[in-house]
Image: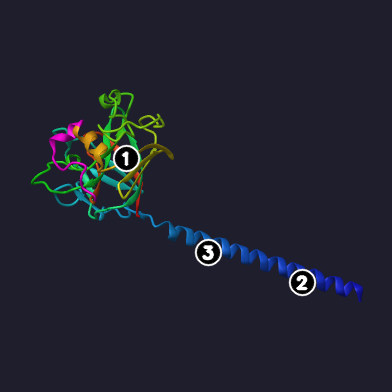
Amino acid sequence: MKKLTFILLAAAAISSCNSSTKSTSTADSTSVAIDSAASGFVSLLKDSAMSNWHVYGKGKVGAAWKLKDSVLHLDASKKADWQTLGGGDIVTNDEYENFDLKVEWKISRAGNSGIMFYVHEDTTKYKYAWNTGPETQVADNKENEDGKLIKHRAGDLYDLISISKEVVKPAGEWNKTEVIANNGKLEILVNDQKVLSTTMWDDNWNKLVAGSKFKEWPGFGTFKKGCIALQDHGADVWFRNVEIKKL
């Protein structure tokens, strides 16, 4: 009788353990799904047709921009003036006001590019995307001429503010830039480290713009809603995991 009781108790314990394990596994799976959905980030490189993008002031994305295996590459082997034949700056179809933007990028040797935001698309007044929207720089600091200039180095808010510390990896290696813009408060992170924080559209911001090359374009840095742009500066550049969340 004691032996039978022991067997029954053991079976009950095993059953309870299995049930607990299954319950925990299901809960973990559900938690992951909820966390993913709750993040709110939307991929901007979701299909090979580049349906979220177009060339600034023009139509569909040109052949020099190649999306393969979720990596976007600007093949700058053929030039068109200082930019790329079949390239050009590409901008999102949608405009964003308050957002959290994440982009991974790598640049070619001596290369130069940029990530712009609050781009106002009006080619009757502004020939290029960078005439309207601030840019966080993408560059080879070692061999590109801009890498020698203050406020022009990778991660900098181009010609406006330098990043607070050097955390950018060299040409050919992947970097991560995050731009958080929320009600005028701007933060930039590079490789998960906060390197820049400022306030847009106040008196200090206006002074920064007035002391920069962008003073030539009235309206630069004043738009509070606009497109995200990836720059064609005539150099090979790669982007991946481009995603954005509205705040």
Which residue corresponds to mark 3?
Answer: 30
In front of the other: 88 or 228: 228
In space, the residues marked 2 and 3 are separated at their CA atoms by: 27 Å
For numbered disc 2, what is the local secondary structure? helix
Asked whether residue 191 is in view, the answer is no
Q: Give the range drawn in magenta.
A: 211-224
**Location of residue 123 in the rendering, given as x and y in whole percent from the top left corner:** 11, 46
Is residue 76 toward the left or the right of residue 174 in the image? Answer: left
Q: In which quarter of the image is the C terminus?
A: bottom left
Which residue corresponds to mark 2?
Answer: 12
Closer to the observer: label 3 or label 1? 3
Residue at image location 8% in from the left, 46% down from the top? 124
Query: Looking at the image, which residue sits at the far front?
Result: 203
For numbered disc 3, what is the local secondary structure? helix
Is residue 2 toward the left or the right of residue 239 in the image? Answer: right
Asked whether residue 3 is in view, the answer is yes
Residue at image location 26% in from the left, 24% down from the top? 145
- Which label was assigned to residue 106? none
**Location of residue 98 in the rendering, given as x and y in whole percent from the top left corner:** 31, 52
For numbered disc 1, what is the local secondary structure? strand
Q: How crowded is mark 3: few (under 14 residues within 10 Å), some or many (20 or more)?
A: few
In front of the other: 128 or 162: 162
**Location of residue 78 in the rendering, given as x and y in whole percent from the top left corner:** 18, 35
Which residue corresponds to mark 1?
Answer: 238
Residue at image location 48% in from the left, 61% down from the top? 33
In front of the other: 17 or 162: 162
In space, the residues marked 3 and 1 are separated at their CA atoms by: 34 Å
The three-letter amino acid code for the residue at tag 3 is: Thr
The three-letter amino acid code for the residue at tag 2 is: Ala
Query: Looking at the image, which residue sits at the far bottom?
Result: 1
